[in-house]
Image (tube, rainbow, N blue to C red):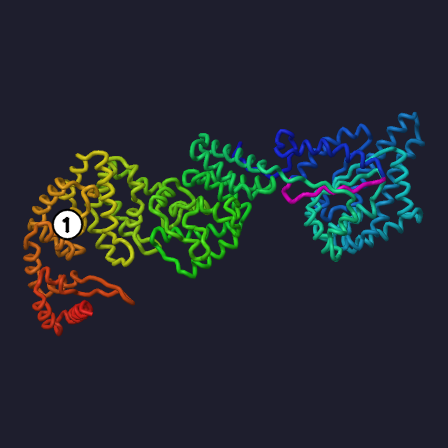
């Protein structure tokens, strides 16, 4: 199964070889066999961690099996696995003993030897090696003190090893010295015409003291003729271990004294690693999505692998990146863009610090795009400087240049100033495209790439999709849901309703059907007064909540104009006559249309920029004239969230004194007077926000001098505090 994780085991099956290890093994094996026929040889098979050394060894073993016909035998020792359970000497000598004894028995049988003579020769072989092992223990005891190795049968380690050697010698008759025993073994090997290839794998995994132990074993204790040692290691790592363990100035120089020739695992051909990654990534996608990657997605996947895959240097890195994808992608397949997902995991494998930087950058940018936070110049500078360090190259082709990042990370730029390298504004179309495709740069989806879940400040896609479905099927329920979202606050303090409005951008609206468009317009016309009442904030540098709603409705009407002009006209007439959000409809939406058409003010736009035709707007205004003149509507005004804007809209729609007459009637009470004046206050900002009460605003409905005199008469009464505040507001308007 493609999505099953790769355990990173070394290759054994020739069919799995994608990097030419089989071919290398076939050509190396004969040379190794020849080396085993001489006076002894130490061969170094060198390569970085993950370069495929063990895979090559597996194929070498297969090739060396045939050499047994020539009495060349392969012994494999993994010293790092031995730990404290056995000595290196014993690990080597026991299999050699078994082979020599077998060979002695075969020769005796071939020569027709019978009985005690044959048994004596066989026993002699075993005894030689059994005696040699303990006698050599003392020679490596000082190293074993640190390494913590054991001699089987004595169950002692460290300092006990030397004691074991001494104790053993007490029970072995004083006889041949280790050198003499070694010579007898050499003679026996030559007499039996046997050769050995001893493979020592993963030497770069040893602790420094253990590495020294193994090297000394190879060079000083077991350097028999007709034995070729094949030592596998990362040269840099092993050299450092020897430097530390031996306390020498140059571990690499010491290693050169031990190893007589080396063979380096060649780097994969330039495109081999990327080809493997691309093929397996495509297979993962096909299995998880039950469809092949094709078209633009396939092209972008290839681009991603070609660019970010340039950082791959070993087969192990390919496996690590693919395993990350196999493990996570099935869980987020509906929330991410697969080429970007592959990009990120390639970066995670080859440049982890950049991966960490991206997580921070995208999280900050997300709240910037959604308007939930700001970022200081110092923060921009710091992140820009970090990016320069992480991607220092000026070469546009290099994976270590910002040019590669710009292809899929929004807001980064190749400029000298660090603070201008990051958090640059993107046009709305680019942001919408990122959201639509669920790209890594999407403020709504970036977190799925890192945490398997969306940002806490973002509504899950499935919930947003539910709202869009309600727009098609149940407008009344959609109105209720949106009203509920008004009452819920996000961590930023803003409502979830505002978040929904922001997600209804032009790109989103462009793919909605007629029923959805109509449903959204109707729902907003039914609940926007509730939203305005709950919001109640002035925004210095961004659209007000009612302004955002206006934008959404205008976009929906534009789309309806393209799809079904009759449906658009029907919808406009309906919201004018039945929309419950009368404050928003009169004071915000339709009033803004009057300005756009040039019926009010001097900000008219050309007809090709109208959302509503002149004819339909006139029909809607006629409907509203009747509605705002209705006594039942007038009775609602005191409960509206923004009385002043409603009164302005009333003035513009009826083009008579109805709104003025109502205001003057309402202000006959002191409470009504105070309330109307407070509603007419604007807002301004210097070093702080304040709310002035201007003469122009008041004179739309009340006499200016009368207003000031009346306030002065109320300053010592029940409304003294509010009056003082209003008088201050008047003074502020005159500054």
Q: State yes or no: residue 661 in magenta.
A: no
Badge 1 crowding class, 10 Å Cα cut-off, few under 14, some 14 to 19, many 20 or more, is: many
On the image, which quarter does residue 114 sit in?
A: top right
Q: State yes or no: residue 41 in magenta.
A: yes
Q: Is residue 696 above or below residue 185?
A: below
Q: Is residue 85 left or right of residue 382?
A: right
Q: Is residue 720 above or below residue 350?
A: below
User: What residue did someone put label 1 on?
Assistant: 586
Q: Is residue 457 left or right of residue 519?
A: right
Is residue 452 visible in the rendered image? The answer is no
Q: Nearer the viewer, residue 462 or 105?
A: 462
Q: Is residue 466 above or below residue 361?
A: above
On the image, which quarter does residue 660 sit in?
A: bottom left
Coordinates of residue 303 in the picture (x, y in percent): 48, 38
Magenta part of the chain: 39-51
Coordinates of residue 673 in the picture (x, y in percent): 11, 64
Coordinates of residue 516 in the picture (x, y in percent): 25, 37
Residue under the image location 78 percent in, 54 percent down: 143
Q: How many marks?
A: 1
Q: Is residue 370 above or below residue 326?
A: below
Q: Nearer the viewer, residue 212 or 392?
A: 392
On the image, which quarter does residue 16 sit in?
A: top right
Judging from the image, what secondary structure is the residue with disc 1 in? helix
Placement of the C terminus among the 4 image quadrants: bottom left
């Amino acid at each position: 199964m493609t999505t099953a994780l790769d355990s990173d085991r070394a290759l054994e099956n020739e069919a799995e070889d994608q990097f030419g290890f089989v071919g290398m093994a076939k050509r190396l094996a004969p040379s190794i066999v020849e080396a085993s026929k001489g006076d002894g040889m130490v061969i170094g098979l060198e390569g970085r961690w993950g370069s495929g050394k063990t895979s090559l060894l597996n194929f070498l073993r297969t090739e060396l099996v045939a050499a047994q016909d020539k009495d060349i035998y392969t012994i494999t020792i993994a010293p790092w696995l031995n730990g404290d359970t056995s000595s290196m000497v014993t690990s080597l000598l026991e299999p050699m003993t078994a082979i020599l004894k077998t060979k002695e028995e075969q020769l005796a049988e071939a020569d027709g030897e019978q009985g005690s003579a044959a048994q004596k020769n066989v026993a002699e072989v075993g005894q030689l090696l059994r005696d040699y092992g303990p006698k050599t223990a003392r020679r490596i005891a000082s190293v074993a003190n640190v390494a913590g190795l054991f001699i089987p049968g004595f169950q002692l380690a460290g300092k006990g090893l030397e004691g074991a050697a001494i104790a053993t010698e007490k029970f072995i008759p004083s006889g041949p010295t280790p050198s003499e025993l070694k010579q007898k073994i050499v003679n026996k090997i030559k007499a039996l015409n046997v050769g050995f290839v001893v493979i020592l794998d993963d030497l770069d995994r040893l602790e420094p003291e253990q590495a020294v132990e193994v090297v000394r074993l190879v060079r000083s204790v077991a350097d028999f003729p007709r034995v070729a040692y094949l030592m596998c290691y990362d040269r840099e790592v092993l050299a450092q271990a020897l430097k530390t363990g031996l306390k020498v100035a140059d571990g690499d120089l010491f290693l050169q004294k031990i190893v007589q020739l080396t063979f380096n695992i060649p780097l994969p051909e330039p495109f081999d690693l990327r080809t493997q990654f691309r093929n397996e990534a495509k297979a993962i996608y096909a299995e998880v999505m039950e469809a092949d990657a094709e078209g633009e997605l396939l092209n972008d996947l290839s681009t991603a692998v070609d660019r970010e895959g340039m950082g791959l240097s070993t087969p192990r890195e390919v496996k690590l990146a693919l395993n990350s994808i196999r493990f996570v992608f099935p869980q987020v397949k509906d929330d991410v863009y697969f080429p970007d997902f592959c990009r990120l995991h390639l970066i995670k494998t080859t440049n982890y610090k950049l991966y960490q930087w991206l997580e921070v950058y995208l999280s900050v940018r997300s709240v910037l795009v959604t308007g939930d936070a700001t970022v200081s110049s110092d923060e921009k500078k710091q992140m820009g400087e970090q990016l320069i360090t992480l991607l220092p190259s000026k070469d546009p082709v290099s994976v270590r240049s910002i040019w590669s990042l710009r292809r899929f990370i929004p807001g980064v730029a190749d400029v000298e100033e660090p603070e201008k390298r990051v958090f640059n504004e993107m046009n709305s179309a680019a942001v919408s495209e990122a959201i639509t495709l669920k790209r890594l740069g999407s403020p709504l989806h970036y977190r799925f790439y890192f945490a398997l879940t969306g940002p806490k400040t973002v509504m899950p896609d499935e919930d947003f999709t539910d709202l869009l479905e309600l727009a098609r099927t149940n407008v009344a329920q959609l109105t209720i849901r949106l009203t509920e979202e008004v009452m819920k606050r996000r961590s930023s303090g803003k409502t979830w309703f505002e978040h929904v409005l922001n997600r209804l951008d032009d790109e989103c609206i462009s793919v909605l059907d007629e029923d959805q468009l109509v449903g959204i317009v109707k729902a907003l016309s039914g609940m926007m007064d509730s939203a305005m009442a709950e919001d109640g904030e002035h925004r210095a540098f961004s659209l007000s909540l009612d302004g955002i709603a206006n934008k959404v409705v205008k976009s929906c009407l534009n789309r309806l104009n393209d799809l079904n002009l009759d449906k658009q006209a029907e919808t406009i007439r309906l919201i004018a006559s039945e929309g419950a959000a009368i404050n928003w409809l009169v004071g915000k939406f339709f009033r803004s249309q009057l300005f756009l058409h040039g019926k009010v003010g001097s900000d008219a736009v050309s007809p090709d920029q109208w959302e509503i035709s002149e004819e339909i707007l006139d029909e809607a205004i006629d409907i509203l004239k009747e509605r705002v003149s209705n006594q039942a509507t007038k009775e609602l005004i005191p409960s509206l969230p923004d009385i002043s804007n409603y009164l302005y809209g009333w003035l513009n729609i009826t083009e008579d004194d109805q709104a003025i007459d109502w205001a003057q009637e309402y202000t006959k009470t002191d409470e009504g007077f105070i309330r109307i004046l407070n509603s007419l206050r604007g807002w301004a900002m210097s070093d702080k926000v304040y709310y002035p009460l201007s003469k122009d605003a008041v004179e739309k409905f009340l006499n200016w001098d009368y207003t000031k005199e009346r306030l002065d008469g109320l300053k010592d009464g029940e409304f003294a505090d509010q009056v003082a505040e209003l008088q201050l507001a008047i003074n502020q308007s005159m500054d």
